[in-house]
Amino acid sequence: MDNRRTFLAAAGAVLAACATKKDVEADAEPSRIGKPLKAYGERAPFEKIARLTPTTKQMENGATRTPLADLHGIITPSSLHFERHHSGVPEIDPAKHQLMIHGMVDRPLVFTMDELKRLPSVSRIHFVECSGNSGSEWGAKSAPDVQRGFGLASCSEWTGVPLALLLAEAGVQKGATWLHAEGADACKMTRSIPIDKGLKDILLVYGQNGESLRPEQGYPLRLLVPGWEGNVNVKWVHRIKVSDQPQYARDETAHYTDLMADGKARIFTFDMDAKSVITNPSGGQKIGSQGLFEIRGLAWSGRGRIEKVEVTLDGGKTWKPAQVDEVRHRMAFTRFRMPWKFDGTETVIASRAIDETGYVQPLRDDLIEVRGKNSQYHNNAVKFWKVNADGSVKNVEA
Ligand code: CO
């Protein structure tokens, strides 16, 4: 707390000095009548934050990542949510889209979008993270910055219908244990999901951050499976089959399984474990001058609420609690902050998240000890950044 008070006092002095200078400049600007009204808003023309797009055209199968280090708070603008699709983004007319629930049910059902939207709805804030996020951080090819190393994760407010409601209406038969959710994209992307999760908290969502879903996010309807790997949050969902076994679909056998050191693979690894990353300062950034600075970052856990976040300023020897923004939503991004004075000393920084189950985000070596380095998936290791004497920041594992 002492740290914080010192920071605020010093920040006050800096602010007073800055404000005086800016007032003079602002007064020098002539006032002019601004632009006219618009039907749909746009950001200021000075704002250029964007997702990197692949240099080679990957129309059918590709990904873009969220520039987390350039954003504020916990909500990802829908326009910057990461994208991952396996056969391009379909254009679906919501008037023609239907959802079928069938298989081991007493009453197979088909819903139109209008029918789904009439049902009791909920809005919840949750992250979605591809299990391949931070896959680069297993080995020698570490990503140079937060977008490339951590950007397959985003957080939105989602609105839709609890799947449990529709399953109750359909009447799940005794012995049913799995759901097979299928998308309406060209590859009919399908994942098997234990029915218990469907009865607990899965949503069929049509709203994202106050608007309809973006086409890239599954318009007009997707699954939102809180805390579970992105791939099971099936987009453009049009069919859910109730079954007594998993389907062993392509994307849960050839992909999205975790190859271990002994050659065996983990399958149906759904939970996204607690994770955090310092977004400022982070790889690729440069601190312009010495002085006061706020270390900022994001933490999240697929198993519930973030309990606390700790930050090290000495390469992991000691850890101090960061300030964590309230409200802390379950299975959602949580923003953390810590005041820091950069005095030109080379410093190795990192954060680690602790969730409400008591789970502590592991160090990379500890994670590799258990899981080896073959897998591309489920890397939630602590990320160290090195702030060099000149203020440039590098990925220590790069
Ligand atoms: Co997995």
Image (cartoon, helix red, strand yellow):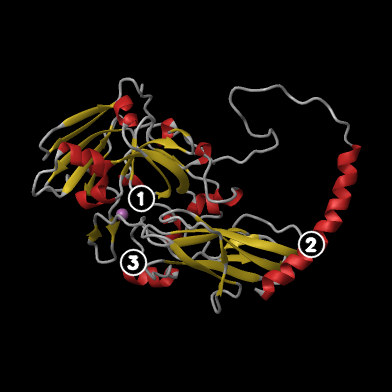
| Residue type beneath disc 2 | Gly
Pointer 3 residue: 372
Disc 1, SS = loop
The front one of 266 and 109 is 109
* Disc 1 packing (10 Å; few <14; some 14–19; many ≥20): many
Pointer 1 residue: 226
Q: Which residue is drawn at 88% across and 43% down?
A: 25
Give the image quadrant in which the ligand numbered 1 is located.
bottom left
Q: Is residue 253 visible?
A: no
Q: How far apart are marks 2 and 3 (CA)?
A: 49 Å
Disc 3, SS = loop
Disc 2, SS = helix
Q: Is residue 375 visible?
A: yes
Percent coordinates x, y for residue 395 in the rendering? 56, 61
Q: Quadrant of the N terminus?
A: bottom right
Q: Distance between the residues labelled 1 and 2?
A: 41 Å
Quarter occupied by residue 234? top left
Q: Are circles 1 and 3 on residues that touch, CB within 8 Å?
A: no
Q: Which residue is drawn at 80% across and 25% down?
A: 33
Does residue 363 appear left or right of residue 295 in this picture? Answer: left
Percent coordinates x, y for residue 193 in the rendering? 23, 48
**Dot placed on the residue nearer the N-terminal end, 1 or 3:** 1
Q: Distance between the residues labelled 1 and 3?
A: 27 Å
| Residue type beneath disc 3 | Gly
Question: Above or below — where is 327 with respect to 384?
Answer: above
* Disc 2 packing (10 Å; few <14; some 14–19; many ≥20): few
Percent coordinates x, y for residue 258 in the rendering? 29, 57
Pointer 2 residue: 12
Q: Is mark 2 within 8 Å of ligand 1?
A: no
Q: Residue furthest bottom?
A: 317
